[in-house]
Image (cartoon, rainbow, N blue to C red):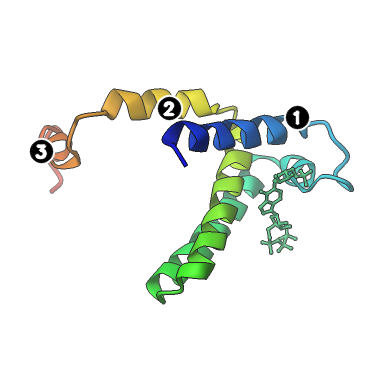
Amino acid sequence: MSTEINADIINHLYDTILSRKDADPNVSYSAKLLAKGPKKTAEKFGEEAVECLIECATGNKKELITESADVLYHLLVMWVSAGVSPDDVWQELHRREGTSGIAEKAARPSDPLK
Ligand SMILES: N=c1c2ncn([C@@H]3O[C@H](COP(=O)(O)OP(=O)(O)OP(=O)(O)O)[C@@H](O)[C@H]3O)c2ncn1[C@@H]1O[C@H](COP(=O)(O)O)[C@@H](O)[C@H]1O
């Protein structure tokens, strides 16, 4: 599957979640989460991220895949809740393209507290 198709899946899921903003919380899980506000969606994302890292740390590849899908879904719910769009994040990733994390870290101003 190409990167373009993967980005399409994220964009499509984001649009679906966005469309649930005013949906019935008894019918849509996204609507139920969004009705609770950004703090709750962030908490849910954190819970799913912890479940995901446990599967990685314990070497459960199959569960890591399903938990990763949960993390991505809850990340998108959090973005909708906080008013962040996939394009905002794609632009930031694009800005970073070609800059090594090691070079970027070395170019940061030194922290006087360290
Ligand atoms: N990808 C997902 C997706 N991944 C995970 N989940 C739900 O996320 C929840 C997380 O599981 P948990 O065990 O943590 O939930 P829980 O503890 O029972 O929930 P809480 O009571 O803690 O909130 C489950 O209810 C999953 O079904 C998802 N729910 C929806 N989607 C997508 O979002 C679309 C819209 O869904 P609705 O908003 O429900 O219409 C769907 O068509 C799917 O494409």
Q: Which residue is mark 3?
A: 106
> Seen in the image, is 43 located left or right of residue 29?
left
- Whether label 3 lies within 8 Å of ligand 1 gets the answer no
> Seen in the image, is 108 located left or right of residue 19?
left
Helix, strand or loop for disc 3: helix
Q: Residues within 10 Å of mark 1 (few under 14, many from 20)?
A: few
Q: Nearer the viewer, residue 99 or 61?
A: 61
Instruction: Evaluate if marks 1 and 2 touch, with contact meaning CB atoms under 8 Å apart.
Output: no
Q: Position of residue 68 (x, y in %)?
A: 51, 56
Spatial CA distance of label 2 from label 3 is 24 Å
Please name the residue shown 55% across and 26% down the image: 85
Q: Which mark is residue 90?
A: 2
Q: Nearer the viewer, residue 37 or 94?
A: 94
Q: Is residue 87 above or below residue 49?
A: above
> Residue flagged by tag 3: what amino acid is it?
Ala
Q: Quadrant of residue 31?
A: top right
Of the two numbered discs 1 and 3 on the same chain, state the one appearing first in sequence.
Answer: 1
